Image (spheres, helix red, strand yellow):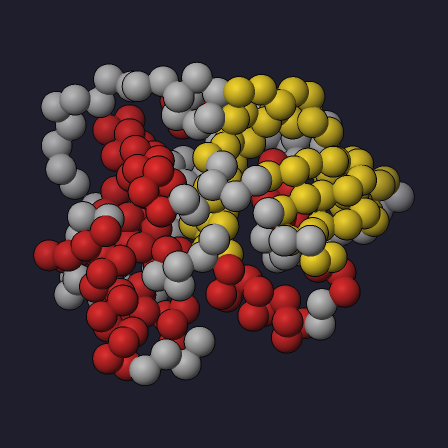
Amino acid sequence: MIETRSVRKTYRVGEQEIRAVDGIDLSIGAGEFLSIVGPSGSGKTTLLHLLGCLDAPTSGQVLIDGTDTSTLTPTELTRLRRERIGFVFQEFNLLPVLDAAENVELPLRYMKVHPAERRRRALEALEQVGLADRARNRPSQLSGGEQQRVAIARALVTRPSLVLADEPTGELDTRNTCLVIELMRDLNRETGQTFCIVTHDPLVASYTRRVITLRDGRIASDLPGEEAELACEGRPEV
């Protein structure tokens, strides 16, 4: 589904060259549920941005379904991101003046989906993440866990084949972390969508079927995960 070939991303800070990603070869198949871990500065977020075509590599190739993304025009890249990739960010990035349903609808607005169909799909996505009864609430009326679930619904509403999540539980407590990552894993199992999760949290990584560890912009290990069943029983609904 997605492949990188000798991908590098470098930045210049004064006279110093920073190799954020340093020659990574990686293949992610359809339907995988994996995590990317490593210390701060190891290149996790940079790699995720390259995989999601939010940034272009300094050298090397990023291929999605066999297409070299460097050959696409800006318009084609925008369409690819909008229609085939869902993004979940740590900060949620919900618009405070919109309610939950309106926030979820946003990607469909950009795709010029008919208003009635937009609303139907937004409500369906909110029901999928257990928030059908919170559709009219604004972000300030939602807990952190609920806001993150709205962000996940927004990422899923376009029915993307690939979901990229950057520290999606970084601001959540253990109970909400369990809820969010279990939700992602259940969706992966039910829909076959590919999930790639950048995390610093061993709790989150233990849920995934594959764990890629980065150090100094390179892959230090690429191992099967254990898919641990974590003890989150008794957590309150949020």
Q: Specify the quadrant that holds the C terminus.
A: top left
Looking at the picture, does residue 209 appear above or below residue 21? above
In the displayed orientation, state which residue is furthest to the right.
15
Looking at the picture, does residue 159 appear above or below residue 13? below
Residue 27 appears left or right of 80: right
Residue 220 appearing in the image: yes
Residue at 47% across, 53% down = 161
Which residue occupies the foreground of this view, 58 or 127? 127
Residue 77 appears left or right of 33: right
The percent position of residue 114, horizontal first and vertical second, equals 32, 82
Residue at 71% across, 72% down = 73
Which residue occupies the foreground of this view, 133 or 6? 6
Which residue occupies the foreground of this view, 148 or 82? 82
- Asked where in the image residue 81 lies, by quadrant, the reply is bottom right
Residue at 68% across, 36% down = 26
- Asked where in the image residue 177 lies, by quadrant, the reply is top left
Residue 186 appears left or right of 20: left
Looking at the picture, does residue 6 appear above or below residue 70? above
Residue 184 appearing in the image: no
Looking at the picture, does residue 98 appear above or below residue 179? below
